[in-house]
């Protein structure tokens, strides 16, 4: 019996030693994840609390805590203000010992946090923000842009609609970094494919009354009114466009960035026929449906957006890299994430390029008519799949200083 107890003690000491060795380079023996999002305004449905749920699901599914690692979470509302987002990021990195920030819808906030993360040597996994500058002129060794970007949206929706005959465009643009980037990237695609831009108007973020902007778009006679906005701005502008009879008058709306939660808010009678680009749809296959069922059970029945899917897989890939390195050094972890290929149930096979751009397929989708939908959240039909190597901007064209 003494030998047996001594054997058990030796095994316990060995296990404790192994766990300690595994975490030897993990600061404070804790992996701390900060979910920085819009928790109260126009982007809260497409990201917000759902992004916290997605990050927690990633930790649970990774099994990393069962292998001796401790993971903690913090979350905060950046209120769509770069100064507030920057202040939170600095406090998290300097005082609260956060290792990685995820999500961050709002490109202005994300670009600010992007630079702070580089300065602090931490890690930043962008899922909610869209500006392609994050992997272009503003790229850093510490950021990965996971889910989508303005170039991808323009390349998918802009090209498809222009080639289908929508060769004159008027842009209604959110007046900050995201809207400017989306307008810029879409205009380039429209012109490249033989179209023209007949006018532009820029609306303040979180606008409630789009009437003056929509009247200008209507008067332009453009075949396509490109909505270079997102979230509540997009749904408000579409609802008000319906009141003005813009689509009935022969013009078409292009929602350049739309989410499943936007369609749910609008309802199929208003949203039917909208064409846009996404990188994730909950009803693509058995694996996406299984993820959505688990997610919805924790988020009042709301189905996950592509932002939520990106937070989930970004966090999962991050944890794999931390465990492989046995370190949470931000710069080293991002480098390891780039070196590791991805093959996951939500985005399929992909990779992370040297410029920080995560590559995976995209889908051109059309919103179903009410008669085509089989029930709640059954909203899309896939018109085309855009292969991973065609969906995003060629790395050589982005101007990222990390690319030789």
Image: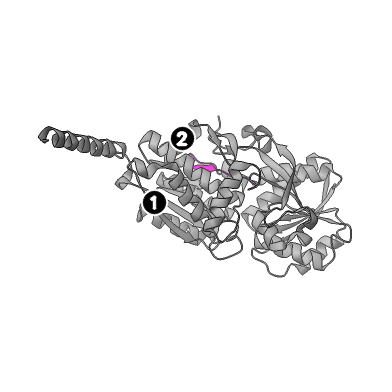
Read off the residue under disc 1. Answer: 98
> x, y (%) of residue 126?
53, 47
> Residue visible at 61% across and 34% down?
395
Q: Which residues are magenta?
A: 136-149
> x, y (%) of residue 254?
77, 53
Secondary structure, magenta segment, majority class: loop
Depth check: give the residue in front, 17 or 203: 17
The image quadrant of residue 149 is top right
Depth check: give the residue in front, 278 or 400: 278
Q: Secondary structure at mark 2?
A: helix
Residue 126 visible from this viewpoint: no
> x, y (%) of residue 177?
62, 54
- Residue sitting farthest toward the front: 1
* Neighbour tally class for label 2: few under 14, some 14-19, many 20 plus, Cα within 10 Å: some
Query: Looking at the image, is 279 positioned above or below residue 252?
Result: above
Query: Residue 319 magenta-drawn?
Result: no
Depth check: give the residue in front, 138 or 20: 20
Asked whether the beta carbons under mark 2 and mark 1 sit within 8 Å of each other, the answer is no
Does residue 205 appear to the left or right of 96 in the view shown?
right
Does residue 338 appear to the left or right of 197 in the view shown?
left
Q: Distance from label 2 to label 1 (Cα)?
A: 18 Å
The image quadrant of residue 199 is bottom right
Query: Looking at the image, is 50 positioned above or below residue 166?
Result: below
Q: Secondary structure at mark 1?
A: loop
> Residue visible at 31% across and 37% down?
22
Q: Quadrant of the C terminus?
A: top right
Read off the residue under disc 2. Answer: 335
């Amino acid at each position: 019996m003494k030998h047996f107890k001594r054997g058990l003690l030796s095994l316990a000491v060995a296990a404790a030693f192994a766990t300690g060795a595994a975490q030897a380079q993990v600061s404070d023996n804790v992996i701390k994840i900060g979910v920085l999002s819009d928790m109260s305004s126009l982007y809260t449905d497409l990201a917000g609390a759902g992004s916290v749920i997605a990050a927690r699901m990633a930790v649970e599914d990774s099994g990393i805590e069962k292998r001796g690692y401790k993971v903690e979470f913090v979350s905060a509302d950046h209120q769509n203000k770069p100064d507030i987002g920057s202040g939170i990021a600095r406090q998290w990195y300097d005082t609260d010992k956060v290792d990685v920030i995820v999500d961050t819808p709002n490109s202005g906030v994300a670009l600010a946090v992007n630079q702070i993360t580089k300065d602090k040597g931490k890690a930043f996994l962008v899922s909610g923000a869209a500006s392609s500058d994050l992997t272009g002129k503003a790229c850093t060794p510490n950021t990965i842009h996971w889910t989508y970007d303005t170039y991808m949206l323009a390349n998918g929706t802009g090209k498809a609609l222009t080639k289908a005959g929508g060769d004159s465009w008027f842009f209604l643009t959110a007046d900050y970094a995201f809207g400017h980037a989306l307008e810029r990237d879409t205009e380039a695609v429209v012109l490249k494919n033989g179209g023209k831009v007949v006018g532009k108007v820029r609306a303040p973020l979180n606008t409630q009354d789009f009437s003056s902007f929509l009247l200008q778009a209507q008067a332009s006679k453009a075949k396509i009114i490109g909505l270079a906005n997102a979230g509540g701005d997009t749904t408000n502008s579409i609802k008000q466009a319906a009141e003005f009879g813009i689509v009935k008058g022969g013009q078409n709306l292009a929602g350049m960035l739309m989410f499943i939660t936007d369609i749910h808010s609008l309802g199929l009678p208003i949203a039917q026929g909208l064409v846009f680009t996404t990188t994730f749809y909950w009803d693509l296959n058995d694996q996406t449906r299984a993820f959505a069922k688990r997610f919805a059970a924790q988020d009042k029945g709301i189905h996950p957006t592509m932002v939520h899917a990106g937070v989930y897989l970004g966090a999962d890939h991050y944890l794999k890299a931390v465990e492989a390195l046995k370190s949470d050094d931000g710069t080293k972890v991002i480098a390891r994430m780039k070196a590791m290929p991805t093959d996951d149930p939500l985005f399929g096979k992909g990779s992370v390029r040297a410029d920080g751009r995560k590559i995976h397929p995209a889908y051109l989708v059309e919103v179903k008519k009410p008669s085509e939908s089989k029930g709640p959240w059954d909203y899309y039909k896939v018109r085309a799949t855009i292969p991973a190597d065609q969906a995003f901007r060629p790395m050589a064209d982005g101007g990222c200083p990390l690319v030789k």
